[in-house]
Image: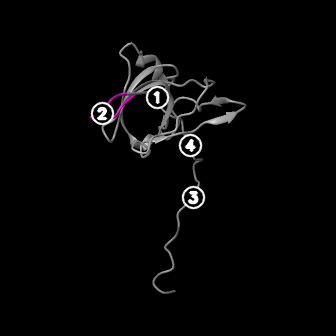
């Protein structure tokens, strides 16, 4: 799915709620988040710094690691915290809440088409492993 520059709400497994905009491919931000010790289990900081410019990795990757900008972080039972950018480790995310204005029919088109797998030529032998060596032989 292409979710660059979409505002989302993410709930983490520890009950923290994160509001933010998914970072685009070439977002250039001026500072890098240093996660606090209480949230270090949930947050990761991945920035490439060169000449006082910070390049943030894009959007959501294959492992569901999510890179956000303009973030409002609300830890469970605490005051909200505002940060410029943040990266969240994918296995710490409970769920995403996407905006209602997002048209999922157009974004999920690629998932509706079945994958075409190449057919094996007739008469080919199955690639089995054999019977093994037996006990102690």
> Which residue position holds label 2?
78
N-terminal label among 1 and 3: 1
N-terminal label among 3 and 4: 4
Q: Disc 4 or disc 2, which is closer to the eye?
A: 2
Which residues are the magenta region? 73-80
Residue lying at 49% horizontally and 38% vertically, measured from the top left:
65
Q: Disc 1 or disc 3, which is closer to the eye?
A: 1
What is the C-alpha distance between the residues marked 1 and 3? 33 Å
N-terminal label among 4 and 2: 2
> Which residue position holds label 4?
119
Rendering coords of residue 118 (x, y %): 58, 41
N-terminal label among 1 and 2: 2
Query: Main structural element of the magenta stretch: helix, strand or loop?
Result: loop
Q: Secondary structure at mark 2?
A: loop
Residue lying at 53% horizontally and 29% vertically, measured from the top left:
59
Q: Disc 4 or disc 1, which is closer to the eye?
A: 1
Tell me the number on the disc at residue 125: 3
**Residue 78 falls within the magenta-colored stretch:** yes
What is the C-alpha distance between the residues marked 2 and 3? 64 Å
Q: Nearer the viewer, residue 80 or 69?
A: 80
> Which residue position holds label 1?
111
Q: Secondary structure at mark 3?
A: loop
- Give the side of residue 104 with respect to residue 118, left or right: left
What is the C-alpha distance between the residues marked 3 and 4? 13 Å
What is the C-alpha distance between the residues marked 4 and 2? 57 Å
């Amino acid at each position: 799915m292409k979710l660059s520059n979409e505002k989302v709400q993410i709930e983490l497994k520890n009950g923290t709620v994160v509001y933010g905009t998914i970072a685009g491919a070439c977002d250039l931000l001026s500072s890098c988040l240093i996660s606090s010790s209480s949230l270090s289990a949930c947050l990761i900081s991945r920035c490439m710094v060169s000449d006082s410019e910070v390049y943030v990795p894009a959007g959501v990757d294959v492992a569901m690691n999510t890179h956000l900008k303009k973030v409002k972080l609300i830890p469970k039972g605490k005051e909200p915290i505002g940060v410029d950018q943040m990266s969240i480790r994918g296995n710490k995310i409970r769920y995403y809440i996407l905006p209602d204005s997002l048209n999922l029919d157009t974004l999920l088109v690629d998932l509706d088409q079945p994958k075409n797998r190449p057919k094996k030529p007739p008469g080919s032998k199955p690639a089995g492993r054999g019977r093994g060596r037996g006990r102690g032989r």
